[in-house]
Amino acid sequence: MDATRYLVNPVLILPGWRIDPPKIEANVVVLNEKTVSEFFGSRERVYSNDQIHNICSHLDRSARS
């Protein structure tokens, strides 16, 4: 089986917390629910919709097992 490698950046979302502006601690972006859309909307797109769907599918299967 040929494994595809993806570069990921960890993001921690803390609903209800006041985090303004978003923080980066030890290479983990820390956001609250109000800053998620703005954060991802300002990022450069790296993966296609098909790649994102594939990644999400694998994560979903892993979480359910």
Image (tube, rainbow, N blue to C red):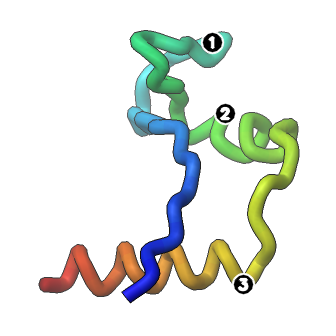
* Residue 6 lies in quadrant: bottom right
Disc 1: which residue: 20
Callout 2, which amino acid? Thr
Neighbor class of circle 3 (other Cα within 10 Å; few <14, some 14-19, many 20+) is: few
Viewer-closest of 42 and 6 = 6
User: Residue at position x 79%, y 54% from top?
Assistant: 46
x and y, in percent, of residue 5 in the image: 51, 61
Disc 3: which residue: 50
Callout 3, which amino acid? Asp
Q: Secondary structure at mark 2?
A: loop
Of the two numbered discs 3 and 1 in the rendering, the one whose residue sits closer to the viewer? 3
Query: Label 3, label 1: how many angstroms apart (C-alpha)?
Result: 33 Å
x and y, in percent, of residue 24 in the image: 53, 14
Disc 2: which residue: 35
Q: Secondary structure at mark 1?
A: loop
Q: Earlier in the sequence, mark 3 or mark 1?
A: 1
Is residue 52 placed above or below 37 in the rendered structure?
below
Q: Earlier in the sequence, mark 1 or mark 2?
A: 1
Label count reads 3
Viewer-closest of 53 and 38 = 53
Task: Answer left or right for 23 relative to 13.
Answer: right
User: Residue at position x 72%, y 84% from top?
Assistant: 50
Q: Are marks 2 and 3 in contact (CB under 8 Å)?
A: no
